[in-house]
Amino acid sequence: MTRRILIVERDGAVTRTLGARLAALGYTVASAASADEAGTPDLVLLDAALRDAPPAVDAPVVVVGADEGVADVAPSFGDRELATTLELALCRHVSARAAHDVEGFFAVSRDLFCFLDFSGYFRRLNPAWEQTLGFTREELMSRPFVEFVHPDDRARTLAQNGAVRGGGQAVDFENRYRCKDGSYRWLLWNSAPRTDERVIYAVARDITARKQAEEERAHLLAELQASLAEVRTLREILPICAYCRKIRDDQDYWSSVESYIARHTRTRFTHGICPTCMETVVEPEIAALERE
């Protein structure tokens, strides 16, 4: 992509000379008599006399003038030196913008970003740490990181840390970190080392709510399994009186079949007479009464 260079120069002759040289080097050239007419270029070549009032543009500014102690570019520069100076200015601007974008993302992210020194101390933390744990970043960086890890998680956390320092990676590693109020929060980690810098780049996510939901599901499952076990026990062993047909419950009380089933299920009874009982019991009783 062709770079657009804006020349802000009071001297028209200088503007024409620079413009011709830049066009020959492959740049698109525009000119303006003052910084107020800057527009939106990729780079600005600014008259040294106007350096105290540079244009308000998101672009690098290179000062042009005869005094090399003040200016970035002098008329004595050859084409190669001129092009090198402009490209370096453009590269520095792109790098600074990228660093600014990263800084902005680092600052506003809800995830926990950190640089962890091989010595075991946090070198850098983003604001999400303070919001999640309650400690200030200064407090977190003043002590070895492992002091904030739950005692039950320290051994495997140190083992994972050693593996990463040795060139490995941590992928979906879970542990608990202490909050300032004494509670603990679950964090899910992904990290990789920069051996040349002796630092681990890591990002963590607060998964406390997810872990609590998993614990609640496990508790409900355990309760359900216990209830099913009780039902199986009741189904396998159900004491019933051989004479009156009452059933003995877990509290050693004897209840009628109707009351026991009603208490342990949602069944409700209504009474009637089956055909067999009608023929063998009820009708003979009626006949006996009639004979009397």
Image (cartoon, rainbow, N blue to C red):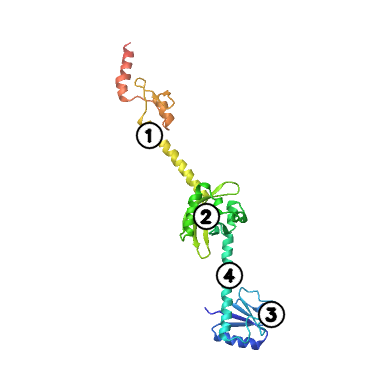
Q: In this view, does 179 lie above or below 279?
A: below
Dot 3 or dot 2, earlier in sequence: 3
Residue at the disc numbered 3: 50
Q: In the rendering, at what x and y percent does residue 284 appear?
A: 30, 17
Q: What residue type is labelled 1?
A: Arg
Q: Mark 4 points at which residue?
A: 97
From where the camera sits, is residue 192 visible?
yes
Compared with residue 233, is residue 106 higher up or lower down, i.e. above or below? below
Nearer the observer, 48 or 69: 69
- Where residue 261 sits, quadrant-wise, is top left
**x 59%, y 63%: residue:** 104
In depth, the one of 77 and 236 nearer the eye is 77
Cα–Cα span, label 4 and label 2: 27 Å
Q: Is label 2 in a helix, a strand or a loop? A: strand
Residue at x 57%, y 77% (from the top left corner): 88
* Circle 4/circle 3 CB separation < 8 Å: no
Q: Mark 2 points at which residue?
A: 205
